[in-house]
Amino acid sequence: MDMVSSEAGKSAGVKEFDVVVVGAGFAGLAALHYLREKMGYKTRVIEAGSQAGGTWYWNRYPGARCDVESLQYSLAISPEVEQEWNWSERFATQDEILRYTQFAVDRLDLARDIDFNTRVASAIHNDQDDSWAVTTEQGEVYRCRWLIMAAGPLSTPNIPDFPGLDTFKGEFYHTGMWPKEPVSFAGKRVVQIGTGSSGVQIAQEISKDAAQHYVLQRTAHHIIPAGNRPLNPGEQEEIKRRYPELRDFWQTLIGATFYQSLPSDPPLVPGDKSIFDVTAEERKKIFDGAWAYGGYAFQRAFPDALKTKEASTLAGDYIASKIRETVKDPATAEKLISTQYFGTKRVILDTNYYSIFNQDNVELVDVKGDPIDRITETGVRLKSGREIEADMIVCATGFDAMTGSLTRMEIRGRDGLLLKDAWADGPKSYLGIMINGFPGMFVIGGPQSCSALANVITANEQQVDWICKAITWLDDNGYTSIEPTIEAENAWVNRCNELADATIYTKGDSWYLGSNIPGKPRRFLLYVAGYPGYKAETEEVAAKGYEGFVLDKARELS
Ligand code: NA7
C-alpha cells in the first residue's frame, strides 16, 4: 500500500509515507516490523540516535542494567529473534541489550526504513486533509496520514537548574546522556547527585575507582537485591522451548512479567495472602525467601504491600533491618533507610549498593537536610556553607518522565493546538494512546498507559498491536481521521486517577506523579490496575467499533 504518495498535490522535497514513527526503541522497532511485514505500509522511523535501542542507547553509563529478567524482557514479535539470540545473565546489562537490539534490527532488516541521527522538531496536523507534517531539526519534512509517537517514557533527561552549573570547570555527565567514549573515575573526586535506579547502579562503579566518592542523596529509595547470576544450564533452552505458552502466562500477570525465572519452580511466595494473615515469624520467613531469591519476588510477596500504608510499612521495616545489618556506621545506615512508603517510588533492584558505604572513599551526603546551594567552579556548595571539591559531577537525576519527550517537540493538532498547552494542567489521554485535539496521532508508552508499570516491551507490543489494527480498520473502512472525544478522555483520566488513589503510589513523591520536575502538575501518570486489565479495556473499546472516538471519512489528502 502506498496511500499518501499516490495522492496528487505533493510538495517538492516532502517525503511521503503512510505512517511515520518517531523513535527506534523497542516500541518503534515493533511498530515498523508490524506495519511493514504484516500490513505492507510505507513506513519511516525517525531516530535521534545513531543506532536503534532508545533507553539502552542513551543510558550507557557504567553499571546500567535492566530490572526485568532478560528471558522475559525481549520482543515477542519475531520467533527468529527470540530463538536465535542467547542471553548470558538473569538480568542483562545495557551493553548486552543494545547488542540484542542491533541483532533484531539486522535479523529483521529494519535499518533500511530508519533515518538515524535525525531529531524531530515539530509535527503539525493539517485539518484540511487529515495529514501530519513532521519536520526534523535539519529541516526535512515527512508527510503521513498516521503518526506514531514512540519517543519513550523515560528519555528526556532532567538536569536540575542548579545555580552556577555552567561555571563548573570539571567533567559533568548525566546518566541518561552518557558519552560513547570511556569515562574514568580513577583517582578522581566524584560528586554523584541522585540515588534512584541509575544512581544506585552507577554508584557501585564509581566507588570502585574514585579517590573520593560523594553520594548526594535527597530521598532514600527502597532497594532490594536483584540476585543476578549467569543463566543456569538448561534454563534458557526450557524457556525458548516454551515461549508461546510462557508469554501467554506472563500476560495474565499484573506486570506482564513473572518474579520467578521459571513458572515450574515451586511458588516462592503465597502472593495472594494479606501481609496481616500471617504471623510475624511466617512473614519474616516469606520475606527471607523472597529476599534470597532476588528480583521482584520481595515486592510480590504480599498483594497488599503496595496498597495500604500499614502493609507497606511492614515491607519497609524489613528492608530497614537489612540496611542496619549491612552498613557499619549507624548514622549512615539510618540516612539510607527510606521514610517513604514502600512502593511509592519504583523499587530498585541492586547488587551491592548498601555495602559501598563501608568503604573509606565513599560518603553519603544528605542534601535534604543540607540542600545544594550552588555549583561552583570547583565543586558543590551546600546551604550550610560546606564546600565539596570535585573533579567530576555525575547527575543521576532522572527524567521528565512520560510527557517530556512529547512536550519538547512542537506538536500542533487540530486548530493549531499546541500539545504543551493542552497538557498545561497535566497530561491527558484516552486509553494512554490518543489525545483529544490530536487526530491521527498515536502514542506508545504515553501518560495513562500501563507501560512503565509493566514489562515495558510487552506493554509496547500490545499498544503496537492495538494501533496497527486500528489503522488497518480505519483504512479498510475509508476513515481518514480518529480522535477521542473530550468526554471519553476525561472519563479515562478520572478512572486512572481513581485507580491510583486506591493504592500507595499517590502517597509519596516520584516521577510517576511528575513531582520530580519543579512546576510539573502533580498527577499520577500511569494506569495502575495492571497489564491484563489495560489490555482488556483497550481491546473492548476496539471491539465496540472504537467507542469514545470520533471517526471522520470526509477528508481526502490535498
Ligand atoms: P529517578 O528514579 O527519578 O531518580 C532521580 C534521583 O535524582 C532521585 O534520587 C532524586 O531525588 C534525585 N534528584 C532529582 N533532582 C534532584 C535535585 N534537584 N537535587 C538532588 N537530587 C535530585 O531516575 P533514575 O534515572 O534513577 O531512574 C528512572 C527510572 O529508570 C527508574 O525508575 C526505572 O524505571 C528506570 P528524589 O527522590 O526526587 O528526592
Image (cartoon, grey):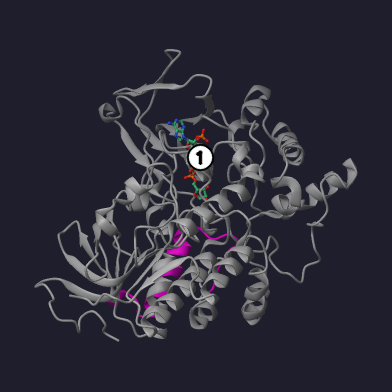
Indicate whether 268 appears above or below 427: below
Indicate whether 513 appears above or below 26: above
- The one nearer the camera, 342 or 491, is 491
Is residue 1 shown to the viewer in this render? yes
Which residue is label 1 attached to?
A: 203
* Mark 1 residue type: Ala
* Residue 507 covered by magenta stretch: no
- The one nearer the camera, 66 or 543, is 543
* Residue 99 covered by magenta stretch: yes
Left or right: 184, with 249 as reference point: left
- The one nearer the camera, 26 or 405, is 405
Indicate whether 228 appears above or below 193: below
User: Looking at the image, which residue is at 43% across and 56% down?
Assistant: 486
x and y, in percent, of residue 366 in the image: 53, 24
User: Looking at the image, which residue is at 25% across and 56% down?
Assistant: 415
Position of the N terminus by quadrant? bottom left
Left or right: 237, with 303 as reference point: left
Q: Which residues are magenta?
A: 86-112
Element marked by disc 1: helix
Left or right: 445, with 161 as reference point: right
Indicate whether 514 appears above or below 95: above
User: Looking at the image, which residue is at 24% across and 60% down?
Assistant: 124
Q: Quadrant of residue 131?
A: bottom left
Q: Residue furthest top?
A: 385
x and y, in percent, of residue 303 in the image: 75, 52
Q: Quadrant of residue 191?
A: top left
- The one nearer the camera, 381 or 427, is 427
Q: Ligand 1 closer than 8 Å to the CB at disc 1?
A: no
